[in-house]
Image: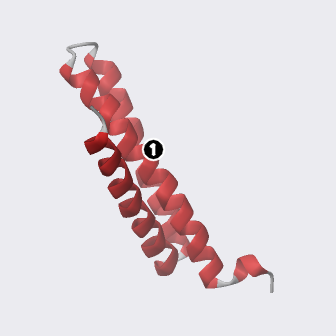
Amino acid sequence: MSPLDTPYTLAALALCLGFALGWAHFASLRRVTGLYLDGGAPWRALALQLGRLALLAAGLLGLALLGALPLLAGTLGLLLARQVVLRRARKAP
């Protein structure tokens, strides 16, 4: 049995993946909002929005296929990334 086969190692990797997915998802939300509010090309904002959601859905689906523990760990990573991005956005001028 290799170290990657243990459920806790898989959960730790899922936590990191969830954090990365969450960081990309919530950090790109500012860009999507800016595109909507600036009155630019709406197709660009819509494409980025759909891409964000598709990437998040694919990541969570992949974690769900690995089992409940990786899915929960990935979701925890997603929520942690949300807190980090929100905290940084509040500090920004």
Residue 46 position by quadrant: top left
Displayed quadrant of residue 17: bottom right
Report the residue marked by disc 1: 24
Q: Is residue 70 above or below residue 31?
A: below
Q: Position of residue 47 (x, y in %)?
A: 36, 28
Asked if residue 24 shows in the view, the reply is: yes
The answer to whether 41 appears left or right of 56 in the picture is left
Is residue 53 visible in the rendered image? The answer is no
Q: How is the image coloured?
A: secondary structure
The amino acid sitting under disc 1 is: Ala
Rendered view: 15 above or below 29: below
Residue 31 spot, x, y in % from top left: 34, 29
- Residue 13's spot in the image, x, y percent? 60, 68
User: Which one is nearer the viewer's eye here, 87 or 74?
Assistant: 87
Q: Quadrant of the C terminus?
A: top left
Disc 1 is placed on an element classified as helix
Residue occupying the point 25% across, 30% down: 33
Q: Residue at x 28, y 13 (%)?
A: 41
| Viewer-nearest residue: 22 or 48 | 22
Residue at far top of view: 40
Residue at the right extreme of this rendering: 1
